[in-house]
Image (spheres, rainbow, N blue to C red):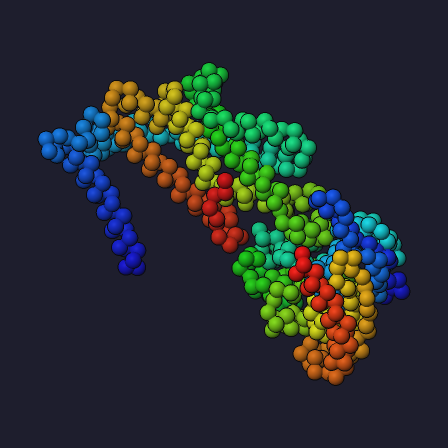
Amino acid sequence: MSDLAAVALTGVDVAFRLAGGGVYTAVERATLTVADGEFVAIVGPTGCGKSTLLNIAAGLLAPAAGRVDIFGAPLTALNRQAGYLFQADALFPWKTALENVAIGLETAGTPQAEARARAQQWLTRVGLGSFGDRYPHMLSGGQRKRVGLAQVLIRDPKILLMDEPFGPLDAQTRQIMGNLLLDLWNADRKAVLFVTHDLEEAIALSDRVVIMSAGPAARVIGDWKVPLARPRDISEVKLDPAFHDLHRDIWHMLKAEVIKGYAQTEGA
Amino acid sequence: MMRRFNLIVLQILVAVVSIALWYALSSYPVFGRILLPPFFFSNPVDVAAQVIDWFAGGVIWKHLWVTLIESILAFVLGSIGGVLVGFWFARQPRTAAVFDPYVKMVNALPRVVLAPIFTLWLGLGIWSKVALGVTLVFFIVFFNVYQGVKEVSPTVLANARMLGMSERQLMRHVYWPSALSWMFSSLHTSVGFAVVGAVVGEYLGSAAGLGYLIQQAEGVFDVAGVFAGMFVLAAFVIAIDTIVSLIEKRLLVWRPEVGEARP
């Protein structure tokens, strides 16, 4: 593991030009680091620009001001060391599950037969070994997320960016997916930046929880270490007293922001 | 099962009643008048006899073949053109913006008026009909491919880039399948228009084809021939449409359901 931070955002501003002229500042002076092998969750009210920060770290979006460093090197183009699991469905609907997983290797020049064989192994690892020939629309929401996870992880990225990946799933499936993610992550401890609006999920999964304020001009307003032992099981960890203490502390701060966020969306 | 059976019985009933009415009203006077004078409406027996005669004598095959070839050529050439230009415009917004008013202008033109020009340029053979069909097919395919490339989901596109795809790989794995899916969803419309182009072209001046057959019959006031031509044409289009449906089902297996043709 390297001493350099996997992701370091320093004083990052994100601004969008509005259609009617004028500028909307989504995120203001955000500073955030993710150490190599660290699992960091970003929590904040809806519309606070959490996803925007991920896009910055992915290099899909350029910040209006501030620095983005990936393992010590400034990020100027697409972040080649990152894998990105999107909130919305991002699988290629015209490819089967197997082809979807294999494509990340094929683009890098791996021969098709080898890419497919490894894709099959990955599908098995995420519990979909016999679903390789299904098209995305034939899979359930949770199964599609599993394929998405395999699609990203097969490339063995050093950094994993996840944007509310389990958001649309039901509670049971979320828990199962969370445990699957922790198992996979435990195997080789990538740096993870995990965006969610679910505080319980954030604490259960991560090493550190970062809280953002309500937008516009959202900021990082809190940073908590999660003192829970690993490996964890999500349903068990939620019974731990330390979990409850931390949840109470963070929620106390988050609640005010959530109310602020609601007031703004109501007003809009 | 029973419902399906009932449905088919009812469907057949509609045909039987219509034909019986047609026959009765064109053969027997009602209150001293024949409501459907055979000179204008012929009658089902004559029409059937004409159709049987064409098929028995083998005359029809040549005409069917000509119309089929014209339709296929119009479809293939129009599609190739539509795909190429659609891709080109979608990837080059400036070019698209420059040509936009002209594309709209040509598309606004009722294509039938081009038929005489094509006859003048390309003669009475199949190519003037192919050209007419191409002008119809091209725009449908063009608009759909253009839309297909433009409307690739931004998330899928971002995902593709994060998975390390180069511009060429994006083309092959993202834009191309998306454009094709839009094109296939308009397959019924574009194939239909290819046939329309062929038949209208034949009708306006040719030496063979279903349109020619109908036009010839009309020229000698052979109403039975006109109706017979119409029935053969309808059956021909239904047959082609069925084949298109089968092809579509195979090509779009990845789709949740095959939607209606988009405009």
Residue lying farthest to the top in this orientation: B120
Q: Residue at x 57, y 29 (%)?
A: B103
Image quarter hosting the N terminus of chain B: bottom left
Residue placed at 24% from the left, 26% from the top? B223
- Up-down relation of residue A199 to residue A71 (above or below): below
Return the residue nearer the eye: A36 or A212.
A212
Is B137 situated above or below A193? above
x and y, in percent, of residue A61 in the image: 76, 51
**Which of the two residues, A14 or B14, is positioned nearer the viewer here?**
A14
Residue at image coords 10%, 31%: B32
Residue A9 showing in the rendered view? no
Residue occupying image coordinates x 77% and y 64%:
A213
Q: To which quarter of the image does residue A126 belong?
A: bottom right
**Residue A92 location (% of width, % of height):** 61, 53
Observer-nearest of B200 and A266: A266
Viewed as shown, does residue B216 lie left or right of B70? Answer: left
Query: Would residue B78 be found to the left or right of residue B4 on screen?
Result: right
Along the viewing direction, whichever of A117 and B99 lies nearer the viewer: B99
Question: Is residue A198 left or right of A30 when viewed as pictured?
Answer: left
In the picture provided, is B86 more to the left or to the right than A69? left
Q: Quadrant of residue A56?
A: bottom right
| Residue B181 % position (x, y) | 54, 45
Give the residue at the far front of this rendering: A267
- In the displayed structure, B116 sits above or below A221; it is above
Residue A206 to residue B85: above or below? below
**Picture coordinates of residue B255, whole percent (x, y):** 52, 52
Res B105 seen here:
yes
